[in-house]
Amino acid sequence: MHIFEFIRPSDQAAAIATAAESKTAQQGADVRFMGGGTTLIDLMKLNVETPERVLDINRLPLGKIEAMSDGGLKIGATVRNSDLANHPKVQKDYAVLSQAILNGASAQIRNMATVGGNLLQRTRCVYFRDTAMPCNKREPGSGCPAITGHNRTLAILGTSDHCIATNPSDMCVAMAALEATIHVQSPKGPRAIPFGDFHLLPGNTPHRETVLEPGDLITHVTLPPPIVGSKQLYLKLRDRASYEFALSSAAVVLTIAGGSITRAGIALGGVGTKPWRSPEAEAELTGKPANEATFRSAAEAALRNGKPQSENKFKIELAKRCLTYALRTTAAS
Ligand SMILES: Cc1cc2nc3c(=O)[nH]c(=O)nc-3n(C[C@H](O)[C@H](O)[C@H](O)COP(=O)(O)OP(=O)(O)OC[C@H]3O[C@@H](n4cnc5c(N)ncnc54)[C@H](O)[C@@H]3O)c2cc1C
Ligand code: SF4
């Protein structure tokens, strides 16, 4: 039986203490916080998630978007995806983030989904969502049928012999390129986690997806001050035009001066086991002329370590073309 509890605004510390009693904050957690519930409730209906207690955090004072004194932006964990995407400062200074969110899910889901929940959304691998099948992520040690089965939509970067599931988030790809920081409150106090350190590669523990521990409540995300003069774009390629996850996507933040790229933030979606920042592409771009040869060599560098599965070899070239096109379009904008 699942017990749902509304957490009152003054009861954040008590909710954290309750969640800290959970044996894990990863797959199999017996206490879960709930934001919009658009991932959690789905997975509870499928018996993939079976928490004993669900703590509804929507009444906590975590729903604001605020300018910070250093010029950056503080985004509360229960801010709805729609509100974040449509915030004037996000549209103006962090356009890649607004575009990424608006490319995800549907208007109705974005109206419910929260920032904290989006950071922790689970893979769409069909075996993970089907309890009749083995899955190392759901049941450690049971096997990974995707490796020899249906893997067309799964990852080509960051995979292991134990799991090849794709991280499905669009928002996270933009946050990786923007170098966001995730802020967590635990019974031991607050801590700040650089975006690139938050999600884990599957390795031989694919059931561990993030660095979160029992009792960790995501309170907010911060974005660094806007990069003056930067051009930004999120490009998403998918099987249909809306309400579909990425086969490949690219978040691009470029600064160009005198025809040369002076700064690049690049991340890929739909191809990695985590939101995939590409330092290889960034190094290939920085200091180089903003032209087609540079863009293509950045895309080659980003996919150099790509390892296709039986059904998704096409993703290597798709991801290269996605990034090249995104770079060309951004530079020309
Ligand atoms: C049909 C459909 C299509 C979709 N298409 C896309 C798409 O194209 N692109 C895309 O990016 N996403 C897509 N999504 C996923 C959607 O973006 C996520 O479901 C949503 O962002 C999750 O947010 P939530 O607030 O509803 O999370 P919840 O379901 O409330 O929570 C998700 C997880 O996060 C945990 N959690 C929530 N808040 C906190 C917190 N503050 N601290 C610690 N833990 C927390 C919960 O315990 C749970 O484990 C789709 C979803 C559906 C159902
Ligand atoms: S790819 Fe990962 S999530 Fe999918 S079946 Fe294999 S272990 Fe499970």
Image (cartoon, rainbow, N blue to C red):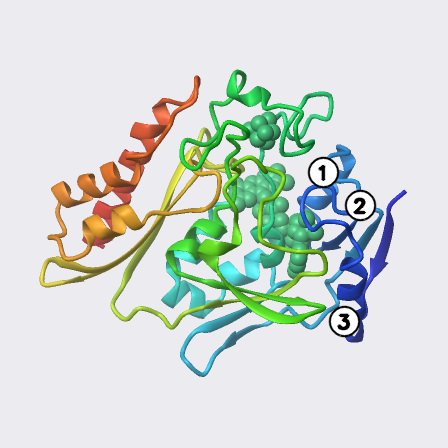
Quadrant containing the N terminus is: top right
Q: Quadrant of residue 323?
A: top left
Q: Judge whether residue 105 can be spotted in this image.
A: no
Compute the Cα span from label 2 to label 1. Answer: 10 Å
Mark 2 or 1: the one toward you: 2
Which residue bears the numbered disc 2? 51
Reply above or below: 229 against 293. Answer: below
* Badge number at residue 121: none
Compute the Cα span from label 3 to label 1. Answer: 26 Å
Q: How many numbered circles does the render carry?
A: 3
Which amino acid, mark 3? Ala
Which amino acid, mark 2? Pro
- Provide the secondary structure element on which disc 2 rests: loop
Confirm or reject: label 3 Cβ below 8 Å from ligand 1.
Answer: no
Confirm or reject: label 1 Cβ below 8 Å from ligand 1.
Answer: yes
Which residue bears the numbered disc 1? 43
Q: Is residue 316 left or right of residue 73?
A: left
